[in-house]
Image (spheres, grey):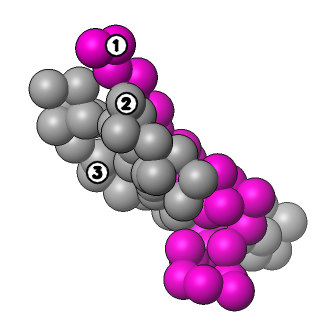
């Protein structure tokens, strides 16, 4: 059986709770229903404008190796 590994980084810091999902969150839920797809979701990193300078939060540590095994 062919296995497809997918990791979706949303980039909006949104949730995947019902009714609060973005299109990336909806795609995550759709792909999760497929047995041949291994899928992960991360809310991503969003910048913050402070005094004309963009500050970025550190990207959450994602264990991509678990998805590929």
Pick whichever of labels 2 and 3 is earlier in the sequence.
2
Q: Determine whether, in the image, residue 65 is placed left or right of residue 6.
A: left
Answer whether labels 2 and 3 touch (C-beta < 8 Å): no
Distance of mark 3 from mark 1, alpha carbons?
27 Å
Task: Report the label total.
Answer: 3
**Label disc, if present, on residue 61 of the rendered structure:** 3
Q: Which residue is mark 1?
A: 2
Residue at disc 3, secondary structure: loop
Distance of mark 2 from mark 1, alpha carbons?
7 Å
Q: Position of residue 44 (x, y in %)?
A: 54, 56
Pick whichever of labels 2 and 1 is earlier in the sequence.
1
Residue at disc 2, secondary structure: loop
Q: Position of residue 63 (x, y in %)?
A: 22, 42
Look at 29% across and 47% down and name the residue there.
62
Crowd class of label 3 (few under 14; some 14 to 19; many from 20; radius 10 Å): few
Q: Which residue is mark 2?
A: 36
Residue 18 is covered by the magenta coloring: yes
Residue at disc 1, secondary structure: loop
Residue 53 is covered by the magenta coloring: no
Find the magenta span and give its range: 1-28
Look at 85% across and 66% down and name the residue there.
52
Pick out the residue farthest to the right.
Answer: 52
Q: Position of residue 17 (x, y in %)?
A: 54, 83
Of labels 2 and 3, the one closer to you: 2
Distance of mark 2 from mark 3, alpha carbons?
25 Å
Crowd class of label 1 (few under 14; some 14 to 19; many from 20; radius 10 Å): few
Look at 36% across and 39% down and name the residue there.
35
Crowd class of label 2 (few under 14; some 14 to 19; many from 20; radius 10 Å): few
Picture layout, residue 7 above or below residue 29: above
The answer, for residue 20, to whether it is visible in the render is yes
47 or 36, nearer to the observer: 36
2 or 5, nearer to the observer: 2
């Amino acid at each position: 059986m062919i296995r497809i590994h997918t990791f979706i980084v949303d980039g909006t810091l949104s949730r995947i709770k019902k009714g609060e999902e973005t299109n990336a969150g909806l795609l995550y839920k759709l792909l999760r229903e497929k047995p041949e797809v291994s899928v992960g979701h991360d809310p991503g990193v969003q910048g913050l404008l402070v005094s004309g300078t963009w500050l970025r939060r550190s990207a959450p540590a994602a264990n991509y190796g678990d998805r590929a095994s």
